[in-house]
Structures are given as C-alpha cells and as structure tokens.
Amino acid sequence: MLWDDVARRVSKTDFPERLAMLRKQRGLTQKALAAEIGVHFAHLRRYEAGGSQPTLEVLCNLARALRVSADLLLFGEENRGPVNEFRVQFEALAVLEPDERRVVRDVLDALLLKHDAKRWASA
C-alpha cells in the first residue's frame, strides 16, 4: 500500500480509530501490539475504545511498533503540517545554510505576526 494512501485514509479518523486501523493493517492483535509496546492489552483496548489516552512514552512506542510517525498517529490531515501546497518548499529548506534558514524563519514569523495583528484589530 502506498504511504500517501495510508496517510489519506488514516487522517480522516480520530485517534482511537486510527490506532485500531493501523494495528490491523500491520496484522497485529491487541495482545501482540500491547506486548510489543510494553502495556497490558486492556490498556490498548481502552485506547482503541477512546476510554483512555496513552502516555507520551506509550505513544512513541506505538509509533515505532506501527512504523508511522507520531503525528500521523495523533492528528488528522487538517491538523498536520505543512499543507501540501508548501510541503516541497519546507522540505527543501533542509539544504539551506543555517543563516539562510534563519531569514526564512524571520520572514515567516513576520507574516504570521502581521496576520495575527489584523485578526486582533478586527476582533
């Protein structure tokens, strides 16, 4: 299955459903995944039912065990960044020198500050 297809399907659900979907895609039972991440399977069952939320350590272990990023596990597409329109540009920033990346960060900060100021002024 292509990564983009997985990301698109997974991002349309909430955390409990995403967790269950990813576990099933890996062919793991609740007991097997729970053992792999070091929790009792009853905890994993509650995570998938939405009855409780895992700790940060457990989230990290879940992401590793399911071979996904933690942000894919936690957030829907609308809450993940950057938006596709800017994804390539943001990924390309890695090749810039540190001083050039600082300039980009400063420009983005200024634009966001300007946006916030307009929003506050109109409120």
Image: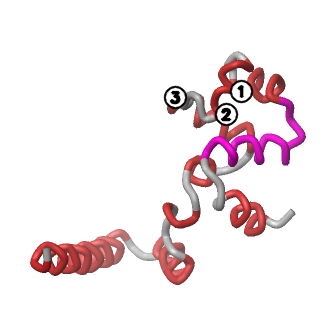
Q: Which residue is mark 3?
A: 55
Residue 103 shown left or right of residue 21 in the figure:
left
Q: Secondary structure at mark 3?
A: loop
Residue 8 image position (x, y, % from top left):
70, 66
Badge 2 crowding class, 10 Å Cα cut-off, few under 14, some 14 to 19, many 20 or more, is some
Residue 39's image quarter?
Answer: top right
Q: Main secondary structure of the magenta part?
A: helix
Residue type, label 2: Ala
Residue 41 shown left or right of residue 63 in the figure:
right
Q: Which residue is mark 1?
A: 45
Q: Which residue is mark 2?
A: 49
Residue type, label 1: Arg
Q: Is residue 80 magenta?
A: no
Q: Residue at x 69, y 48 (%)?
A: 18
Outermost residue, right direction?
27
Judging depth in this view, the residue of 13 and 106 nearest the camera is: 13
Height in image: 9 above or below 110? above
Magenta stretch bounds: 15-29
Height in image: 64 above or below 54? below
Whether label 1 touches label 2, CB < 8 Å? yes
Residue 77 image position (x, y, % from top left):
58, 64
Q: Residue at x 62, y 48 (%)?
A: 73
Kindly report which numbered mark, 2 or 3, lies closer to the viewer in this rendering: 2
Q: Name which of mark 3 and mark 1 comes first in the sequence.
A: 1
Q: Secondary structure at mark 1?
A: helix
Q: Is residue 18 magenta?
A: yes
Disc 2/disc 3 C-alpha distance (Å): 16 Å
